[in-house]
Image: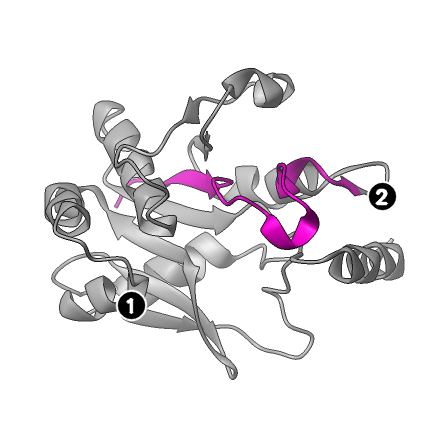
Amino acid sequence: MKQPYAIILAGGRATRMGGGDKGLLPLGNATLMDQVLERLLPQVAAAAINANGDPARFARFGLPVLADPVAGFVGPLAGVLAGLDWAAGEGAETVVSVAADTPFFPCDLAAQLLLAAEGKQAPLALAATSDGRHPTFGLWPVALRDDLRAALEGGLRKVVQWTDAHGAATAMFPSPPDPFFNVNTPEDLARAQEMQEAQA
């Protein structure tokens, strides 16, 4: 199978952070998005950012910025669909999704998702730890994009409802520490700064 493409899900409204783009928040000497890209880009053939509104705010990253193809802030699956539509136009077979507010995800995320999905009818897998699944971190087949579009237009919003219907595999990652720790509040951002310093 070809190396996957990637979509960084940055379309959330960050209400607990007072609004704005969580991916642009400072972390160390850079931003959450910089940390995400540092981990992600070695794992994939190409990447794009899913975000709504003015794409110019992400210009310095030099990546395509894709708006949700389904109106109304319907959740992360709309961002996944944006990535699948883009990847289809690039000739890719699969897309790995990651969240823009999760700066310490595994450096072997894509490899483990591909391994988990091996031999499945569709290369579909979600990341998980002992705490449960992390549905914004997954491997998505371009071949199912029209099925996903129809599901979203029909009102489906829960990621696992759609993935379970298609027999998604699970890629387990060790924890603690939680590799999918994400920044939802100012307190989380302070903790991320501490984690970043501990890793330096």
Please give the name of the residue rendered at 20% of the width and 62% of the height, measured from the top-left corner: 162
Q: Residue furthest bottom?
A: 130
Q: How far across and down, in percent of the image, does residue 159 sit?
A: 30, 61
- Mark 2 element type: loop
Please give the name of the residue rendered at 44% of the width and 53% of the height, measured from the top-left corner: 110
Q: How far across and down, in percent of the image, does residue 198 sit?
A: 88, 61
Q: Is residue 175 above or below residue 69?
A: below
Please give the name of the residue rendered at 51% of the width and 22% of the height, measured from the top-left corner: 63
Of the two numbered discs 1 and 2 on the same chain, state the one appearing first in sequence.
2
Q: Residues within 10 Å of mark 2 (few under 14, many from 20)?
A: some
Residue flagged by tag 2: what amino acid is it?
A: Gly
Which quadrant of the figure has residue 174? bottom right
- Mark 1 element type: helix
Q: CA distance from mark 1 to mark 2?
A: 33 Å
Could you tell whether 119 is left or right of 115 in the image? left
**Does any portion of residue 47 appear in the rendered image?**
yes
Which quadrant of the figure has residue 41? top right
Q: Which residues are magenta?
A: 1-26
Q: Which residue is mark 1?
A: 160
Determine whether label 1 and label 2 are within 8 Å by CB. no
Could you tell whether 89 is left or right of 100 in the image? left
Could you tell whether 166 is left or right of 170 in the image? left
22 inside magenta stretch: yes
